[in-house]
Image (spheres, rainbow, N blue to C red):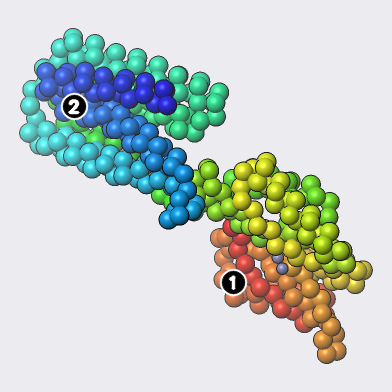
Amino acid sequence: MACGLLGIILNALLFAGKLFAGMLSGSVAVTADAFNNLSDAGSSIVSMLGFKLAGQKADSYHPFGHGRMEYVAGLIVAMLIVLMGAELAQSGLEKIAEPQQVTFTALTAVILSASIAVKLFMFAYNRVIGSRIGSVSMLAASTDSISDTAATAVVLISAVVSHFTGIQIDGWCGTAVGLFIIYAGCRAAYDTVSPLLGQRPSGEFVENVKKTVLAHREIEGVHDIVVHNYGPECVMVTLHAEVPAEGDILALHDAVDAAERDLEETLGCIATIHMDPVVNDADTRRLREETAEAVKRIDQRITIHDFRAADCSGGKRLSFDALVPFGMEKSDEELTAMIRDSAAAETGCEIDVKVEKGYV
Ligand SMILES: [Zn+2]
Ligand SMILES: [Zn+2]
């Protein structure tokens, strides 16, 4: 919180200083750069507010808590930034059409240089503290600071060039800063919309879930992991745990319950585990291995689970789920047919396959 406050104060000071310099010199580029810093101060304020709203406890209307409020706040800020960037780009374009004399003074140069120094300090500060405490938002702020440094440097260089050569590039430079602000706003919008739509969880999180569940030796494997994220305070996980079909159901259920509790304690997520019995006699195991082989021949990345071998008239009927990756050229229907043919040719059994895509 304190570091957020420091950023807001510094950005507000930079805005005031550069707005003054922009009005003094009549430069749209310097004014646009001033508003760039105002947008940073504004987004820090809204994210602090969002953080407060997001921290509200769950209630009867919102049992999943208010964590996603932070993303909604971020989206509103991003839209405001894009609007402001468009406004600034427009005044830059007007200045290209009708160039006006820019009076560049030493004071403008001093203010812009001081601004670059302050932004470099904010870059280093956010980077060092952000990596020490592992704060994603501080690291994002450090990236933002370094691109602001570049924008101000461009404005300063263009002012110096105009002053000594008499070439009027102030309008172009103002337009460029406006476009830069639009770009930053679009990127911020993407970053907040993405978690609202629902993202794939990090590979590290999924690995930790697997490791925690498989620490219980009764559980032989896991599949169909789904992670729902309502903000860091409310993460819900469902998964299927593979347990030996011949085991004692009460003992296995105890193990599954213990795994759910472990997930809550170590990863802070609410877990629901569904038990899938796995038959391990020699016949079934051979059929499962042959089927897995046959499926891999279509694409190395396809895996199978929930494998059942049932007797039917004149032979066996194999039913299983096939997990296929996103971005395959073939449609699910085509893949279903290919897997069915390939597995039937390999095992000589009747095949009942369901093709599915994963959530992790
Ligand atoms: Zn099941
Ligand atoms: Zn399953």
Residue at disc 1, secondary structure:
helix
Q: Is residue 249 above or below residue 108?
A: below
Ligand 1 shows up in the quarter that is: bottom right
Q: Tell me which residue sits at (29%, 36%) in the image.
A: 181
**Residue at the spot x=74%, y=63% of the render?**
275
- Residues at marks 2 and 1, CA–CA distance in whole angstroms: 55 Å
- Identity, as a three-letter code, of the amino acid under mark 2: Thr
Question: In the rendered image of this protein, does residue 208 appear above or below residue 2?
Answer: below
From the viewer's side, name the closer residue of 337 and 280.
280
The image quadrant of residue 204 is top right
Residue 303 visible from this viewpoint: no
Query: Mark 2 touching mark 1, by CB under 8 A?
Result: no
Sooner in the amino-acid sequence: mark 2 or mark 1: 2
Q: Where is residue 286 in the image (x, y as percent from the top left)?
A: 88, 68
Residue 31's disc is: 2
Residue 183 image point, x, y percent: 32, 40
Task: Left or right? Give the position of 113 relative to 190.
Answer: left
- Residue located at (51% from left, 20% from top): 128
Q: In the rendering, at what x and y percent does residue 337 appear? A: 66, 77
Seen from the viewer's position, the closer of residues 236 and 106 is: 236
How many C-alpha atoms fall within 10 Å of the one at disc 2: few (<14), some, or many (≥20)? many
Residue 324 or residue 330, whichever sits in front: 324
Disc 1 under 8 Å from ligand 2? The reply is: no
